[in-house]
Image (cartoon, rainbow, N blue to C red):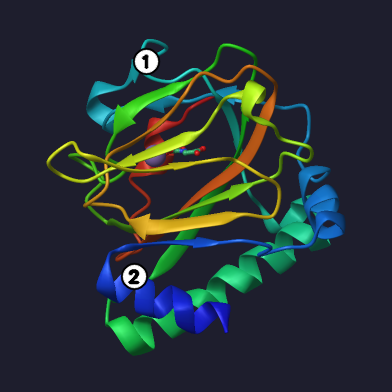
Amino acid sequence: MALEQLLDSIAEKGWYIWDDFLTIEQVKLLKNCASDDWHRARIGRKEEIQRATDIRRDKIQWLDVDMGQPVQDYLERMESIRREVNQSLFLGLFEYEAHFAQYEVGDFYKKHLDAFRGNESRKLTTVFYMNEDWSEENGGELNVYDLNDQLIQTIAPIAGRLVVFLSEQFPHEVLPARAKRHSIAGWFRTNGVSESRFDILS
Ligand code: OGA
Ligand code: MN
């Protein structure tokens, strides 16, 4: 079962690719929950917010239960994963936060760690992809590295695929998109202080 594979894989190597996490039908419904209200993300701690379009070009909107049942279902699914991970891996995950992300043609996200200074509470990253009919010429692959900067895996952002990895151990980058790219990035955190929310101010 995929959930057991996830737990084994996170314990053994720290990352996992879960294909068909949702059906194409569910992906469509979830994708439609995003509004037209996209924000440019900012990077850094709340004291030193900087616009960082040289680092990332995507636009985002935070998931909220008010967005509809598909979003509620997605968040509930993550909640059950959170409990399972805590029971078997003792990560002490406390909360989950996630945003829709939209990459226009040419948009990218340069190599980074999700648990950067000021955001150490991010422990486990999830990225869910919603690109139906993705093909290689669409670009926008996720490159995952180890802490020695060795490329571990290039991952295509295909619809229904969920990627999970330990936030502190895997630098990663989004290669330039050559077609509009849709995803949901999310993080399980160890405490209730939502530091990152201060980073993303519209
Ligand atoms: C992020 C991120 C990866 C992706 O939003 O922090 O690294 O494939 N996203 O969208
Ligand atoms: Mn990231």
- Residue at 56% over, 69% down: 78
Extreme residue toward the left, this view = 148
Whole-number angstrom distance, CA of label 1 to CA of label 2 = 31 Å
Amino acid carrying mark 1 in the image = Ala
Figure disc tally: 2
Would you call the spot at circle 1 few (<14 residues within 10 Å), some (14-19), or many (20 or more)? few
- Residue at 48% over, 84% down: 4
Whether 111 is drawn above or below 13: the answer is above
Residue assigned mark 2: 10
Question: Observer-nearest residue: 63 or 108?
Answer: 108
Would you call the spot at circle 2 few (<14 residues within 10 Å), some (14-19), or many (20 or more)? some
SS of the residue under disc 2: helix
Label 1 CB sits under 8 Å from any ligand 1 atom: no
Q: Please identify, in this view, whether the residue under mark 1 or under mark 2 is nearer the observer.
A: 2
SS of the residue under disc 1: loop
Label 2 CB sits under 8 Å from any ligand 2 atom: no
Residue assigned mark 1: 52
- Residue at 70% over, 23% down: 180
Give percent across and percent down for residue 46.
29, 31
| Residue 93 visible from this viewpoint | no
Q: Quadrant of the C terminus?
A: top right
Report whether 25 appears left or right of 43: right
Give percent across and percent down for residue 150.
20, 39
Report whether 168 appears left or right of 85: left
Amino acid carrying mark 2 in the image = Ile
| Residue 170 visible from this viewpoint | yes
Give percent across and percent down for residue 55.
36, 18
Q: Quadrant of the N terminus?
A: bottom right
